[in-house]
Amino acid sequence: MSKKATLVFSRHGESEWNVANIFTGWVDVDLSEKGLGEAKGAGELLKAEGLKIDVAFTSYLKRAIKTCNLALEAADQLYVPTNKSWRLNERMYGGLTGLDKKETVVKHGAEQVQVWRRSFDIPPPPLEKDSKYHPSNEAKYKALDPKDVPDTECLKDTIARVMPYWEEAIVPELKAGKTVFVAAHGNSIRAIVKMIEGISDDVIPGLEIPTGTPLVYELDADLKPIASPLAVEPLKFGRYLGDAEKIKAAAEAVKNQTKVG
């Protein structure tokens, strides 16, 4: 199988609310100091791998936009055209938005919070429209049809939001044989990876995507992924760039964000 196109994902670097262990979703928080370093590090890995990006895609949220820019700058490719879409935003965490993850576990129980965080089709309670965190109150979403601005989302909802943009904007670039960089969020990346890898509904919520770590797919002429011997379960086709042990530790850290005690 010969390579036709390359697709590279990077989840944004660590954010200020990742540090504070707060449910973030669509809240536009900035990168932490460590996150800025992770974003640059992602770009250095792209450069070391010899990847030449043709076009980039990111969300409307600054933690992903900055990751995209910093990675491209570190790869000496800041000139690359970049497209932004709200459809690549993180999953909307509804009524959990702005809450401390561990306090939420103490209040609602570990099992319930795990369902909200990692179930495929059960969303958290909706976020009230008058909440200071509701995206309908932000200028960046004023052009959207109000029905497209979510009050809450499960992963299934996030997939339904992301995939039309994948089909209409990203797929044509891949079909043209380009190397495409997508700097986005854990759940918007999960949505696309689920489709590429054919991962089942029950397995995909548990796929932990570490921050600031490029995930590379080589695609054939039919945009089918080419298997990589460097893929880590449950992935069969995508390979992470960088130190394997560090990547594993970073993924574990994401998984343990709601552990109490």
Image: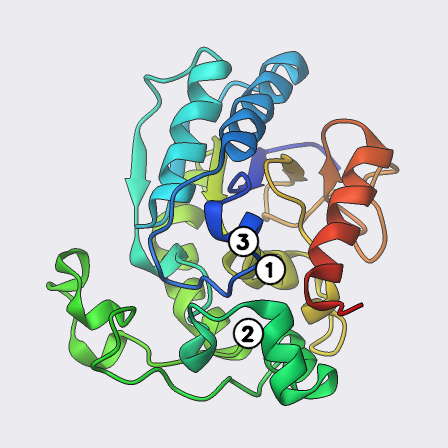
Q: Image height check: is 57 above or below 86?
A: above
252 left or right of 222 in image: right
Circle 2: residue type: Leu
Label 2: which residue?
155
Within 10 angstroms of label 2, few (less than 14), some, or many (20 or more) residues?
Answer: many
Residue pictured at 61% horizontal, 86% vertical: 107
Quarter of the picture containing the C terminus is bottom right
Find residue 254 and report its horizontal and vertical position in percent. 69, 55
Q: Looking at the image, which is closer to me, 195 or 210?
A: 210
Residue pictured at 37% horizontal, 62% vertical: 26
The reply to whether discs 2 and 1 touch (Cβ–Cβ < 8 Å) is yes
Q: Looking at the image, which is closer to me, 106 or 116?
A: 106
- Mark on residue 18? none
If you read the primary sequence from the N terminus, does the residue marked by circle 1 or circle 3 appear first? 3
The reply to whether discs 1 and 3 touch (Cβ–Cβ < 8 Å) is no
Callout in the foreground (2, 3): 3
Circle 3: residue type: Ala
Q: Looking at the image, which is closer to me, 235 or 45?
A: 45
259 left or right of 56 in image: right
Residue pictured at 30% horizontal, 50% vertical: 60
If you read the primary sequence from the N terminus, does the residue marked by circle 2 or circle 1 appear first? 2
Q: Image height check: is 138 above or below 105?
A: above
Find residue 142 and report its horizontal and vertical position in percent. 11, 64
Label 3: which residue?
20
